[in-house]
Amino acid sequence: MISHVLPTYNRAPIAFEKGEGAWAIATDGSRYLDLGSGIAVNVLGHANPDLVAALTEQAGRIWHVSNLYQIPQQERLADLLVEHTFADTAFITNSGTEAAELAIKMVRKYWHDQGQDRIEILTFEGAFHGRSTGAIAASGAEKMVKGFGPLMPGFRTLPWGDLDALKATISDRTAAVMLEPVQGEGGIRPLPDADLREIRALCDQHGALLVLDEVQCGMGRTGRLFAHEYAGIAPDIMMVAKGIGGGFPLGAVLATEKAAAGMVAGTHGSTYGGNPLACAVGARVMEIVATDAFLAEVNRKAALFRQKLEGLVAAHPNVFEAVRGQGLMLGLKCKVAPTDVVKAGYAQHLLTVPAADNTLRLLPPLNITDDEIAEAVSRLDRAAASLA
């Protein structure tokens, strides 16, 4: 008999009823150190007092207003996003998948209004842009697209990091190049800054738009507010979600005025996107995360964490191969199945997340403490020892 909850996940036999910072507390009272953060969502940890206060205050005022009206909280969040990024405008969504759909629409509408039949978007192997039919078509991954055809046409997937393949493929018929500066689901694979700069130059050369997916690597996760800032470039369109809501469902598409020019009244909409509750929380996240002092602490903790993880790899050469990633978006390349490490972590009351390319993802809250980092590595050490 089918479960009352559609069985699209192989869920671990653990249920949580409470959270405190970097800790998730199970229904039996057990405390788990959370290095997954809901897959890079809880950037300020569980039940962060600032976010609880923002949500509670707004909940006592008004929850939902149609986008037929002005929404001050939405305008506040959009103002903050524009102030701290390349963008001239923002559309607030409920998720990263919704943001991806709008980004694709925005690209196509841009070229339609230019009177040019340019629809092909170049993407890269290992990408993850969401689970709608458009987003899985963009990924090109067989395991995601199998059984869901026919899919949206107009995507071509290239090998990850292969700039020669990109140079051979991009042309004056290319609508856009879309990629993650650091792949998350693909195995914590950062694109070198020099490569990102070259991709920007290729897009400029051929008149194509550059679309960045910073759903997982954005919002301070890499030590900058957004990962592409390290390369000193700016996209035309960017998808944001996960960390921007600190745990509340929220996403956004950011764009330049030029790229967004075709998105006039009636071309897109959302019932819940930009609602007062979500935007009140998102604005508070931005106020905290988008500061030099906060991001400096992320970088300091990232250096500490990485140093300890390098020692862990050296101590368990039969389990781990290398550390990779940027900021507090780190991965342990494994010599065993990463799911085995995840399960061994459960026994140590530690939460981690598997990824492709035999990688274990470590995505702690950005405000994790030094002591919690030390404790996390100690528990990882015990988990690895149990596998040896």
Image (cartoon, rainbow, N blue to C red):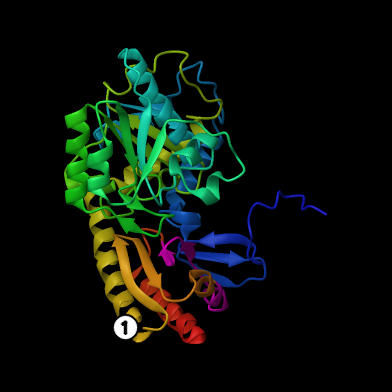
Res. 95 in view: no
Q: In which quadrant will I find the N terminus? A: bottom right
Q: Position of residue 328 (x, y in %)?
A: 33, 61
Which residue, as the protein is rendered here, is positioned at the far right? 1
Q: Residue at x 42, y 66 (%)?
A: 359
Q: Is 151 in the magenta?
A: no
Q: Position of residue 233 (x, y in %)?
A: 19, 40
Which quadrant holds residue 59?
top right
Q: Residue at x 72, y 50 (%)?
A: 5
Q: Name the residue nearer the viewer: 178 or 368.
A: 178
Q: Residue at x 17, y 31 (%)?
A: 205
- Horizontal side of residue 318 vs 114, given as left or right: right
Which quadrant holds residue 65?
top right
As drawn, 259 above or below 141:
above
Q: Is 344 in the magenta?
A: yes
Amino acid on which disc 1 is placed: Ala
Q: Position of residue 92 (x, y in %)?
A: 43, 31
- Horizontal side of residue 274 vs 113, given as left or right: right
Please report the bounds of the magenta region as a residue range. Answer: 343-362
Which residue, as the protein is rendered here, is positioned at the far front? 168
